[in-house]
Image (cartoon, rainbow, N blue to C red):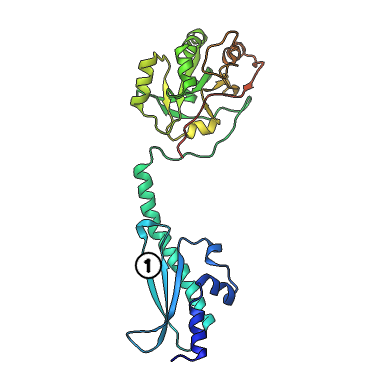
Amino acid sequence: MQNDGQRNKNQKYHQPAAKITQQCLHQPTLTDLQFPNRVDGLSPPTKSSAQNTPHLRISILFSDFPEQSKTKSVLIPETKQNFTEDLLMIRNLTLVAAALSLALALPATAQQTTATAPAQKSGAMTTIGAGDTAPAFTLKDQTGKEHSLVDFKDKVVVLEWTNPGCPFVVYHLKENTTTDLNKKWKEKDVVWLKIDSSNFVTADAAQKAVTDNNIDVPVLLDASGTVGKSYGAKTTPHLFVIDKDGKVAYSGAYDDNPTPEKKDGVKNYVDAALEKVTAGEKPEVTHIKSYGCSVKYAK
């Protein structure tokens, strides 16, 4: 038979651990601390098999990492220590368990990411505009040849973000928009480069798009999205005209027809910008919001 004092003591041990901690220690709860484990609960005092000293048993549940999902039990001697000291020990053991859980889970998580991710995550998106220095880059095209922006110093360069699966890109391919402009401005030493920053892009897929659509300019592969984000490329298509000094002269849409359908009287902003830039002048229009499909960056 248990006396009232013993029953009250056992009832205390049956309270949720977070609640006990908050009431007796005046410390943040485990939820507030956002650890990758939690105290599953407290069982009543039990007798250790090794000795007759009452013990507290706590169970740590590693719940946030499926591969590490285990429940670990720890016996804490009750002896003459008061209840507050017991709770302090529980909290300290919880902190240690949290650190061990995280340490065990991180290598496995990193290994899985490396094995399954199609492309390494890139940096933060930036925004550049007229007058800004064009970010330097080096990328390989669909044939494996490297292209660096610095190689085209003293030349006007057009960068066009592309994705052959996008209806807006398909429309311009069918209309030979790039092909016609490239033929027109190539005579004035303008370099045209397409860049595919889709996280799933491969050299074989890019080569197929080049062959199927008679693309006559290199398609640079930026699966990590690093170059695309450094330019702030948001859609396909999205174009940047870079002058001979390496400064952005125009950025944005091809034209004023934000649909994948042919219309009469369309104004081509890229063509107009090249007219000015190749003559050493600034374009009348330096930016028009791009339209099309979103760039499928690695996440």
Q: Is residue 51 above or below residue 121?
A: below
* Residue lying furthest front: 1
Q: Is residue 7 visible?
A: yes
**Observer-nearest residue: 1 or 55?**
1
In this figure, which residue is indicated by the disc labeled 1? 71
Q: Exactly how many numbered labels are in the figure? A: 1
**Observer-nearest residue: 286 or 115?**
115
Q: Is residue 144 visible?
A: no
**Observer-nearest residue: 184 or 175?**
175
**Observer-nearest residue: 267 or 96?**
267
Q: Position of residue 97 (x, y in %)?
A: 43, 67
**Residue occupying the point 37% across, 67% down:** 71
Q: Specify the amino acid type for callout 1.
A: Thr
Question: In the shown orientation, is residue 208 left or right of residue 267?
Answer: left
Quarter placement of the N terminus = bottom left
Label 1 crowd (10 A; few <14 / some 14-19 / many >=20)? few
**Residue occupying the point 42% across, 19% down:** 218
Q: Is residue 65 above or below residue 201?
A: below
Q: Position of residue 279 (x, y in %)?
A: 61, 11
Q: Position of residue 204 (x, y in %)?
A: 33, 25
Q: Position of residue 232 (x, y in %)?
A: 55, 31
Q: Is residue 107 above or below residue 231?
A: below
Residue 216 image-quadrant placement: top left
